[in-house]
Image (cartoon, rainbow, N blue to C red):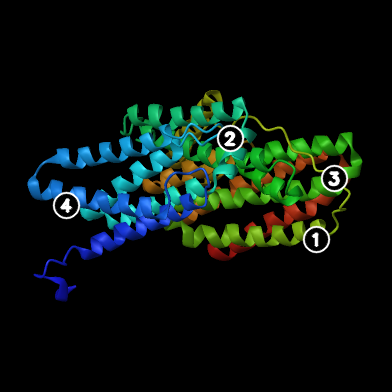
Amino acid sequence: MDFMQGNGLEHLPAFVTSLGIGLLIGLERERSPAAKAGLRTFALVALFGTVSALLSDETGSPWLLLGGVLIVGIMTVAAYLRDKSPGSDPGTTTVAAIVMCYGLGALVWYDYSTLAVMLAITTTILLYYKSELRGITQSLTRRDLISILQFSVLTFIILPILPDRNYGPYNALNPHQVWLMVVLISGISLSGYIALRLVGERYGAPLLGLLGGLVSSTATSLAYARHNRENPRIIQLSVVVILLANLMVPLRLAVLGTVVSPDILPTLLPILGTGMIFGLASAAYWYRKLLEKSATVVPRIGNPAEIRAALGFGLIYALVLFSSAWISDVAGSRGVYAIALVSGLTDVDATTLSSLRLLALGKLQVMQAATAISLALLSNICFKLGLVFFIGGPVLGRRCAGGMLAVAFGIILPLLILRA
C-alpha cells in the first residue's frame, strides 16, 4: 500500500496477518477448558514471532529469533508445571501449538504469508479434530500400520535409489518409471484399503463397493460372489457391491491417464465416461431393489502395499511394457492389441500404464493407446463376469451380467465412433 511507505507503517500488513493467524489458532484453544493459552496468548505469540524475525533480520543475528522460541517454549512449559491439580491437561499439544504459532509469525515476516496461513489452517484443523483423529488411530490395526510403513518404504526408500534411465533394446524399461507406477497403483489401492477399514459396515453396500473397487475390483467381486454362494439371501447386496466395485476400474484408469499422460484424456475420457454412465444406470436399478434387511458383509482384502505384491505388479508391468514394445515393433498396433486382450484378463492397470508409457515414448499414437486400454478393460470385464458366474452361481451371474455388459457396451460404442 503506497500510503504506508515512508511513514513506518509499511510492515503493518505482516503484523495484521500474524495477528489473524494467532487469533485463528487461539480461537480453537479457547474452547478447551484445560488449555492454559487462548486467544490473547496465541495472538501475542504470533506477533512476537514476527517482531523477533524483524529484529533478527535488521540486526543480522539469528540468535534473536532462536532466543524468542526458547522464551516462548520455556514460559509455556512453566505455566503447565505450576498446575499440580489431579487430572490436569499435560499441555504437550498446546505447547507444540504455541511454538508453531511463533514460527508462523516469523514466516510472515520472511514473505511466506500464504504458506503461513495455510499451515495455520492446517494446525487449527488438527487441534479441532482431536477426537476424530484419535478414533481413526484406534480403528487401525497393526496390519494397517504395517501397510502404511510398507508404502513408505516403496515410495521414500526404494524409488529414490532407482536409476532414471532407459534400458533394453527398445529403451522401454526405465527402473525409476516402472517403480513410480508401482507407487502410484499402491497409493490408490492403499487409500481405498484404509478407507474401507475405517468405514467398515457403517455406510452400507454403495461405499463398500466403491472402496473395495479402489483396492481391488477382482478381489471384491470374488469375495461377494463367495458370500452369495454361502448365503443366497444377500444376493441383492452382492450384485450392488460387485457392480459398483467394477465401476471403479474405469475411474482408476482415468486417474492413471491424468497423472501419467494427460494428452490422452480427450480421447480416453469419452470412452471411460460412457462406460461408467451405462454401468451406473444398472447399479442404480439394483440398488433400488436392495432390501434394507440385507446384511452388510465387509470383504477380506489383502494389504495392497505389501512388498511382495508391489514386486509382482512391477514385474508384470515391466513384462507387459517390454512385450508391447517388441510386438509393436514387429507386428504394429495389432500386436499391442493382442497383448492388451491377454494381459487385461489379470491386470488392466499394468496394461494401461504400459500403453501410456509407449505413448510417451512415441511408439504408440493416442488412438492406438486408447484402443489398447479399452480392449484390456473389456477383457477384464469378461474375465470377472466369468468368475462371478463360476463362483457365485448362475443367478448372481445373470444379475451382474446386465450391468457389466452395459459398461462394456458403453466402452465399445464411443470407441467405434472415435475410430470411424
- Farthest bottom residue in view: 3
| Numbered mark located on residue 285 in the image | 1
- Farthest top residue in view: 308
The answer to which image quadrant residue 164 occupies is: top left
Q: Earlier in the sequence, mark 4 or mark 1?
A: 4
List the residue tagged with mark 3. 396
- Farthest right residue in view: 233
- Identify the residue at horizontal 15%, vertical 40% (top origin): 62
* Secondary structure at numbered mark 3: helix
Give the x, y percent position of residue 366: 45, 55
List the residue tagged with mark 2. 137
* Secondary structure at numbered mark 1: helix
- Residue 251 visible to an observer of this rendering: yes
- Quadrant for the N terminus, please: bottom left
Amino acid residing under circle 2:
Thr
Crowdedness of circle 1 by 10 Å Cα count: few (<14), some, many (20+)?
few
- In this rendering, position of residue 341 left or right of residue 390: left
Amino acid residing under circle 4:
Leu
Give the x, y percent position of residue 157: 39, 27
Task: Give the CA distance from mark 1 to mark 3.
Answer: 15 Å
- Identify the residue at horizontal 38%, vertical 52% (top origin): 120
List the residue tagged with mark 4. 54
Amino acid residing under circle 1:
Tyr
The answer to whether mark 3 and mark 2 are in CB contact below 8 A is no
Task: Give the CA distance from mark 4 to mark 3.
Answer: 71 Å
The answer to which image quadrant residue 230 occupies is: top right
Task: Give the CA distance from mark 4 to mark 1.
Answer: 65 Å
